[in-house]
Amino acid sequence: MKEKKSFLTFISENTFIHILLSILLGFLVGAVFLAIMGLSVGAAYGRLINSVTSLKGFTYVVVYGVPYIVAGLSVAFSFKTGVFNIGAEGQFVVGAMGAVVTSLLLPSLPKFLLVPLCFLAAMAVGAFWGILVALLKTKRGINEVLSMIMFNWIAFYLSNYIAGLPGIKNEGSAEATKNIAENASLLFSKDYIKSAGVAPTFNWGFIIAILITLLVWMIIEKTTLGYELKAVGANKYAAEYGGINVNRSIMTALGISGAMAGLAGALLVMGMGQRISIFSSQEGYGFAGIVVALIGCSNPFGVFVAGLFYGALIYGGSKLNLVGAPTQLINVIVGTVVFFISISTIFRYVRYLKRDPAKAKSGKEGAKA
Amino acid sequence: MSKEYVDMSTPTIEMRNIVKKFGDFVANDGINLTVHKGEIHAILGENGAGKSTLMNQLYGLLKPTSGDILVNGKKIEMNNPRDAIDAGIGMVHQHFMLVQPFTVTENIVLGSEPVKGVKLDMASARKNVVELSERYGLAIDPDAKIEDISVGMQQRVEILKALYRGADILILDEPTSSLTPQEIFELIQIMHNLTHDGKSIILITHKLKEIKEAADFCTIIRMGKYIGTVDVDTVDENDLASMMVGRKVTFKVDKPVHDFGPVVLDVKDLHGVDYRGVEILKGLNLQVHAGEIVGIAGIDGNGQTELVEILTGLRKGTGGDATVNQVSVYNKSPSFGFQHGVSSIPADRQKHGLVLDFSIEDNMILQNYGKNPFAKKGILQRDAIFDHASKSIEDYDIRPRLSEKRPAGTLSGGNQQKVIIAREVQNDKDLLIAVNPTRGLDVGAIEYVHRYIVEQRNKMKAVLLVSFELDEIMSLSDTIDVIFDGKIVSSIPGGQADENELGLLMAGGKTK
């Protein structure tokens, strides 16, 4: 309308700025809460920053971030292909269990065989978990969001059941599985960790995360497979008209997304986890993947950075009680960030309305017709 | 058109030197419009010429950057549609804004319901609506639900809605775009009834025939500029067309007489059901030869949609067969049909034709993304894809230029259609199925689309044209097949068709 762009226009056109602003607002809201509780904002945020900037702290951030990155890529991939993989949580859980069970069944295999085998097992069960939902959707027309949420619970109880089985369950008092086989672990050697002064759980997982990031980018941007899946996601009618098999595409998309969520689970247990606890509630890595995908704008590289950011918040947040601030503050910040990112759609729509109300109206009507 | 009812004294509406800018873009550049009492005034312009922008200013949806709006000689500031309604202006949008599960009466009185105490007085509302409809010959059933009545009826409801709010000036935005020929005829009657009663009508359109039939005066806008206002009696369709597009327009497509080749499409005893599961194709037979355009003339809902969906693999038939070059494409997938010689220009370009979020270059390869040179070993070849799009944009005059990487959704309707045509024509299949290929397009774009369809025919391809525009069917077809109640009831050589005869056949009547 006016010659100069409004602030609203500027931020809704520039995704990167918009996300930075949302993050800033998240910390601002967090600060308000700190102030209300009578705590020092500087001390809390100072602690947060200090705890992630040392070498040891940063390697912790990487270790924490890896499962979030890969789970985020899983969800981002589903966003790009028009299915909303809210079932990443369940796929993550069954993937982790797949890796643990594989390692416990074949503990004597050499590392160079056992590690890839655990990855494959995790991806296979994750993909299976995703494809089951896709089959229910394409063959029986069952809404995928509903069945995914149910599958998350099935995965949760299945995992607890398996974790309690003799031969899997820890012989000690811990309510958890045995530790994974030594040869399935991704941890760096103790000597290296000691001499380099990095986090004790520092592991090879970040290399896998980098590779998966590149792979997802390749698939989405460069391959005919990505083209097909994106076309189905953007307009399944045109895709079908153009000769793409829509049902097969939905299955492929959920299969790949599920495989990545399963791999994320494997990376957690083969890296910093080493075993799976008998859960009292859902751990939420898959749900965090949704948050990470949102912050990363579903762009693979964006997701990589967002996963690290999320890891930093979780790790740094765990240190907040040292200054008397509750660790739940992190949830407030994350929630606010997600809130502001999610309303970007509203920003865009408001701008659209302001530009030409009649058009916005007829556009909406036209979309319905 | 006699102007006996036009009162030439004080203009009802005067828009003076209207300028509307969106940033650097000038959508309206000094437009003048004068409408008198009892006048039907057409506003003619190509898609994107600025017609709707102008009307949105009159209706208070947009504010002019500069210029004045006068109603009955008084300057008026239109801040929102409420101001326009208070000034006696009513607008019927191209896409209706009706509440589907409500009755006709409820929709008409919505927002200004008569009340008795705190209770809604539906009885007097219904009475008012019936009176109004009888007064202007707008026959409607006041108790029918919107979801149960035809598009033509819904439009009457929209008009009544405006009249109920006391409109003296009606703006009709592309009112005929989804009406059948009979409904168009009736609408023009209604418009005359209204003007005879002293109402004024502003008709936004790009259909020249309707302007000649209905309007008294016509204001032409081209690329946001005011070209002029003419007395419709003094011009013909050709004059209007060239004023609108700024060059000479030919309506006649060059179609040399030639012998047809062998049968390409052969549809035998085809049966099919519609989305409700009701049988709608009842043993349809149809043939299209190489080098022949077969036009399907019929009223919407007689099985055209289902016929095309079955031929393109989007719907399963319930009996019969359809072959292309002797290979059955019946109840196969869309890609099977494509591989065996079927390409199509779908009826709904935004739903079936394009992925609007995809760039133009990606839309250009929708069926061929996996084939050399666009992909090698599963990897997309971006250079080849870009070059293909660049060449198509140039060859098919897709505007704006250099738009290879732009989302298809940012193009105008006409240019979106050109993208589809460029793709389907270059697919170079033996059978082209075109469904309402020029719907919503302006004269310039229509001419262009028609040329490409006829070119396919001249290259000895078979063309099946399904269109609700009778003129289009009559001017392009070598053979006109009339569809009624799920069957082809008559097959007439294109040159010998007569509009009245076709109209009768389409309605299920018999001739001779």
Image: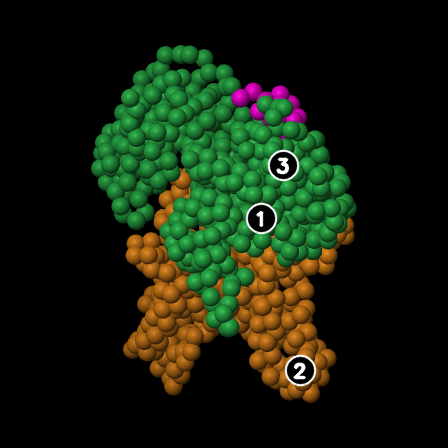
Chain colours: A orange, B green
Is residue B243 one of those drawn in magenta?
A: yes
Mark 1 lies on residue: B91
Report the mark closest to the observer, 1 or 3.
3
**In the rendered image, the vertical position of residue B75 relative to residue B321, given as above or below:** below
Left or right relative to B162: residue B259: left
Q: Which amino acid type is shown beneath numbered disc 2?
A: Leu
Magenta-colored segment: predominant secondary structure: helix
**In the rendered image, the vertical position of residue A10 relative to residue B335, given as above or below:** below
How many marks the image carries: the answer is: 3
Range of magenta residues: B237-251
Kindly indicate whether the residues beneath marks 2 and 3 are on one polypeptide chain: no
Task: First in sequence, mark 1 or 3: give its number.
Answer: 3
Q: Quadrant of residue B316?
A: top left
Q: Which amino acid type is shown beneath numbered disc 3?
A: Val
Report the mark closest to the observer, 1 or 2.
1
**In the rendered image, the vertical position of residue A194 relative to residue A171, given as above or below:** above
Name the one closer to the observer, B13 or A330: B13
Mark 1 to mark 3 CA distance (whole Å): 21 Å
Q: Which x, y percent locates residue A264?
A: 46, 64
Mark 3 burial class by Cα count in 10 Å: few <14, some 14-19, many 20+: some
Q: Which x, y percent locates residue B252?
A: 51, 19
Left or right relative to A124: residue B187: right
**In the rendered image, the vertical position of residue A155 relative to residue B316, given as above or below:** below
Q: Chain of mark 3?
A: B
Element type at marker 1?
A: strand
Mark 2 to mark 3 CA distance (whole Å): 74 Å
Mark 2 burial class by Cα count in 10 Å: few <14, some 14-19, many 20+: some
Labels 2 and 3 touching (C-beta < 8 A): no
Q: Which x, y percent locates residue A174?
A: 40, 83
Mark 3 lies on residue: B6
Please report the residue visible at 37 percent of the width from the left and 35 percent of the height from the top: B299
Q: Chain of mark 1?
A: B
